[in-house]
Image (cartoon, grey):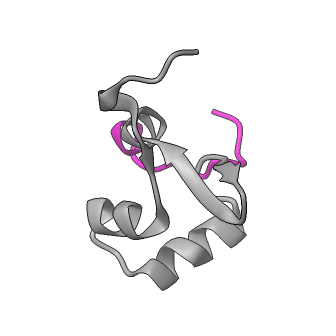
């Protein structure tokens, strides 16, 4: 899969800013399985912007629950 500028990788701080929550809240969501699966790059967690956009479009459903 080829990544475009529109599909750049986002970090936790960026996701927190997008959804208007604290970084700690996003960490809690990750621990609870509410955020889509990240891409591990070294020790950092990243998400494709398209994945996060789709997750928000769907109303931020728990990522570990079947749709």
Does residue 61 appear left or right of residue 41 in this picture?
Answer: left
Q: Is residue 15 above or below residue 38?
A: below
Most common SS among magenta residues: loop
Could you say which is closer to the camera, residue 27 or residue 41?
Answer: 41
Residue at 72%, 58% in the rendered image = 42
Could you say which is closer to the camera, residue 17 or residue 45?
Answer: 45
Q: Would you identify the image quadrant in which residue 55 lies?
A: top left
Does residue 31 appear left or right of residue 21 in this picture?
Answer: right
User: Where is residue 65 drawn, in percent x and y?
Assistant: 70, 45
Residue found at the far front of this picture: 42
User: Where is residue 13 drawn, in percent x and y?
Assistant: 40, 70
Could you say which is closer to the camera, residue 37 or residue 14?
Answer: 14
Report the number of discs: 0
Where is the N terminus found, in terms of image quarters? Answer: top right
Does residue 22 appear left or right of residue 25 in this picture?
Answer: left
User: Where is residue 19 drawn, in percent x and y?
Assistant: 31, 62
Residue found at the far top of this picture: 1
Instruction: Decide whether residue 31 is among the magenta residues.
Output: no
Q: Is residue 56 above or below residue 32?
A: above
User: Where is residue 23 drawn, in percent x and y?
Assistant: 44, 79
Residue at 28%, 59% in the rendered image = 18
Where is the C terminus found, in terms of image quarters? Answer: top right
Q: Is residue 11 above or below residue 66?
A: below
Does residue 52 appear left or right of residue 31 in this picture?
Answer: left
Residue at 39%, 60% in the rendered image = 15
Residue range corresponding to the magenta coloring: 56-67
């Amino acid at each position: 899969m080829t990544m475009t500028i529109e599909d750049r990788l986002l970090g936790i701080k960026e996701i927190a800013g997008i959804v208007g929550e604290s970084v700690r809240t996003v960490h809690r969501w990750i621990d609870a399985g509410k955020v889509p699966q990240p891409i591990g790059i070294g020790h950092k967690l990243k998400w494709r912007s398209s994945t996060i956009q789709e997750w928000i479009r769907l109303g931020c459903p728990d990522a570990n629950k079947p749709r």
